Image: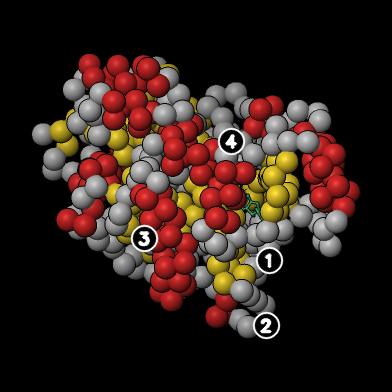
């Protein structure tokens, strides 16, 4: 029987922990640092090691004789956690730092894509503000300005005018907004179309595409308000047809993985392509080196195979021998956030109704919760993700919202339109064209 160490403490990591807990091969799960939700899962214990503490994580993995480390967030991957575990012979699910650079450095990602002629918006990268502004002046339309490094999803400005783009360039390169992450910027052609995230398990050679989840990045119904980490997700996405996934696999995923393998840095873990489906076909907006959150909370409950076996297959380069089967059900995750999210904070508030939501048939994944004196409190940010499955998207969505309605805490807010937008086929006169963000 195996011990797994899950790294991270959000809803994605609770979903990973819950899914790993179903494996007959796993008898102990440690989560660093975890949250009250992971602590309440069977055979699971939180340990007080931060997700960014590479030395502490390696020491804990050795001390606890861990058989597999499953890494949730990008920062420890970019900082070399997988490399450090490789060096002591512990299998890790998650790419090496060389591969994670595709997420950690947008200039590198653009150079990589361009060198392979993988479709992506035309771009140039700059450290010098004068050169960036001179390039901007020559562009016929306003581009997108991106901080080069990891900026917690906030480093992208989709400018409406050249003036806005210039202001973003100055903020990053002159005023030091985003610090080191903004010391190089990508000036990228704005693309138009529908956004789609395509995620795959990869063992370096073989890959398996997951059912596509549609994220809802904006705070408010109808895609209004500021960007957030993600307010909900649903599967299946009406945009992700078989033909489109085949095209993405052939033109984007296959060449990416082949190039990394040929460079001696095979990609092992989840690779996540943020795409714009344009009139000229799918183009890459970004590559992430991990599962999305909340997408993972909607997708992982659909995995019928053993996640532990899938992860070991990815880590060991033997995915082709592992079954990766998915339920044909639909899945909806609605995120409940604290007052003030995404900009402000809120004092801890008691949560009621968690058991009732489970009785409605929902899975309740914790993110920003705390447990004090036996009570579960909302502790700010994204607090809970409520997931339900159903034979149709409408059924999954109704069930998830029934769960949400039974839960309450002061200041709780959530979107009411997750999984409820009309697919494009439904009404040609009202095309499905609003961006959704992966
Ligand atoms: P990224 O982190 O690069 O995926 O960018 C975050 C969000 O900004 C994306 O999900 C898109 O909504 C938007 N975005 C990024 N690049 C572009 C682009 N070239 N054209 C239009 N929108 C973009
Ligand atoms: N939900 C988007 C992300 O995890 O990057």
Marks 4/2 in contact by CB < 8 Å: the verdict is no
* Image quadrant containing the N terminus: top left
Q: Determine whether the residue tagged by mark 2 lies in a helix, strand or loop.
A: loop
The foreground one among 280 and 367 is: 280
Tell me the quarter of the picture where residue 241 sits: bottom left
Badge 1 marks a residue whose secondary structure is loop
Which-is-in-front pick, marks 2 and 3?
3
In the rendered view, does 135 fall on the left or right side of 411?
right
Q: CA distance from mark 3 to mark 1?
A: 24 Å
Q: Identify which residue, 361 or 328, lies in the foreground.
A: 328
**Label 1 CB-ligand 1 distance < 8 A:** yes
Residue at screen point 85% across, 39% down: 130
User: What number is the disc on residue 192?
Assistant: 1
Indicate the secondary structure of the residue bearing disc 3.
strand
Numbered label attached to residue 357: none
- Tag nearer the camera, 2 or 1: 1
Location of mark 2 (residue)? 429
Numbered mark located on residue 209 in the image: 3
Residue under numbered circle 4: 150
Specify which label sits upstream in the sequence, 2 or 3.
3
Q: Residues within 10 Å of mark 3 (few under 14, many from 20)?
A: some
């Amino acid at each position: 029987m195996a011990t797994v160490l899950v790294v991270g403490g959000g809803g994605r990591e609770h979903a990973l922990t819950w899914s790993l807990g179903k494996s007959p091969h796993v008898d102990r799960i440690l989560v660093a640092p975890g949250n009250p939700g992971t602590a309440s899962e069977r055979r699971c214990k939180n340990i007080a090691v931060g997700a960014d503490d590479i030395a502490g994580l390696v020491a804990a993995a050795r001390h606890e004789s861990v058989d597999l480390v499953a890494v949730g967030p990008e920062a420890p991957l970019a900082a070399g956690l997988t490399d450090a575990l490789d060096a002591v012979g512990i299998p890790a699910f998650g790419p090496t730092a060389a591969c994670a650079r595709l997420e950690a450095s947008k200039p590198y990602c653009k150079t990589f894509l361009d060198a392979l002629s993988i479709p992506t918006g035309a771009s140039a990268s700059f450290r010098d503000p004068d050169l960036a502004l001179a390039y901007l002046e020559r562009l016929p339309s306003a581009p997108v300005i991106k901080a080069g490094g990891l900026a917690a999803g906030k480093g992208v400005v989709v400018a409406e005018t050249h003036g806005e783009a210039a202001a973003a360039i100055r903020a990053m390169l002159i005023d030091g907004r985003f610090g080191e992450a903004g010391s190089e910027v990508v000036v990228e052609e704005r693309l138009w179309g529908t956004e789609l995230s395509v995620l795959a398990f990869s063992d370096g050679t073989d890959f398996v595409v997951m059912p596509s989840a549609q994220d809802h990045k904006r705070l408010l119904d109808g895609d209004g308000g500021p960007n957030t980490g993600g307010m909900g997700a649903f599967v299946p996405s009406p945009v992700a047809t078989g033909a489109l996934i085949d095209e993405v696999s052939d033109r984007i995923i296959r060449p990416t993985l082949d190039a990394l393998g040929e460079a001696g840095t095979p990609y092992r873990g989840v690779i996540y392509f943020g795409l714009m489906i344009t009139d000229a076909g799918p183009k890459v907006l970004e590559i992430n080196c991990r599962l999305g959150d909340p997408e993972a909370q909607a997708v992982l409950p659909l995995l019928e195979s053993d996640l532990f076996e899938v992860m070991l297959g990815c880590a060991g380069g033997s995915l082709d021998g592992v079954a990766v089967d998915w339920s044909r059900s639909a899945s909806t995750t609605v995120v409940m956030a604290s007052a003030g999210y995404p900009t402000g904070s809120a004092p801890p508030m008691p949560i009621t109704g968690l058991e009732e939501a489970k009785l409605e048939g929902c899975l309740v994944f914790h993110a920003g919760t705390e447990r004090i004196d036996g009570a579960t409190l909302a502790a700010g940010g994204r607090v809970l993700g409520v997931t339900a499955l159903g034979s149709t998207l409408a059924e999954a969505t109704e069930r998830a919202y029934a769960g949400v309605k039974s839960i309450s805490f002061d200041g709780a807010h959530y979107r009411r339109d997750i999984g409820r937008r009309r697919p494009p086929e439904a009404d040609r006169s009202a095309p499905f064209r609003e961006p959704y963000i992966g």
